[in-house]
Image (tube, rainbow, N blue to C red):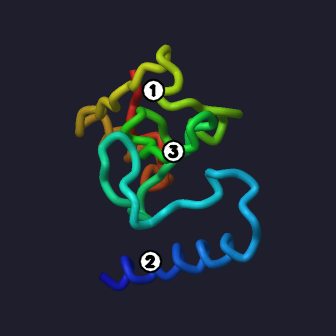
Amino acid sequence: NKEKRRLERKAAAELKKMSKRPPKHPTDEIDMNACHCMCRKPFDVKKFYLACNKCFRWFHGRCVGLTEKRASRMATWECPECNPNFVVKQPSRRPATSRAKSASNDVNADFDDEEEVYE
């Protein structure tokens, strides 16, 4: 609960900073009260979002099959509605034994943001 309040304060401070300057792009601002993504869930500061470069709507990386790391390597991205050729790839989890084995070999396993494998 403390962590949630801290994250909400951080998001509010970030939004306040953004409101002091004119938006460079429609994706600069997130309406925290609006529903986002194709899942229609309200904004959550703990989730990773990415904006479509065509319609400027926000999507959960998980809902469109992209990790934050993978999305950061993309110059542009268009959502499934704007790009009919885009195929949403659902994450497949590695078996628990595979994760445990790789974690025992990797001291930074807790920091692996590529835990989900997209096929």
Amino acid type at circle 1 is Pro
Which callout, 1 or 2, points to the residue nearer the camera? Answer: 1
Q: Are marks 1 and 2 in contact (CB under 8 Å)?
A: no
Amino acid type at circle 2 is Glu
| Image location (x, y in percent) of residue 98 | 30, 34
Q: Residues within 10 Å of mark 3 (few under 14, many from 20)?
A: some
Q: Distance between the residues labelled 1 and 2?
A: 29 Å
Residue drawn at (39%, 25%), measured in percent from left and top?
88
| Figure quadrant of the N terminus | bottom left
Residue drawn at (63%, 42%), measured in percent from left and top?
72
Mark 2, residue position:
8
| Dot 1 or dot 3, earlier in sequence | 3
Mark 3, residue position:
57
Q: How crowded is mark 1: few (under 14 residues within 10 Å), some or many (20 or more)?
A: some
Mark 1, residue position:
80
Secondary structure at numbered mark 3? loop
User: Can you say whether 78 is above or below 29 in the image?
Assistant: above
Q: Are marks 1 and 3 in contact (CB under 8 Å)?
A: no
Q: Which of 10 and 17 is in front in this view?
A: 17
Q: How many marks?
A: 3
Residue drawn at (75%, 66%), measured in percent from left and top?
22
Secondary structure at numbered mark 2? helix
User: Can you say whether 103 is above or below 91 in the image?
Assistant: below
Amino acid type at circle 3 is Arg
| Image location (x, y in percent) of residue 10 | 53, 78
Q: How far apart are marks 1 and 3 (CA)?
A: 11 Å
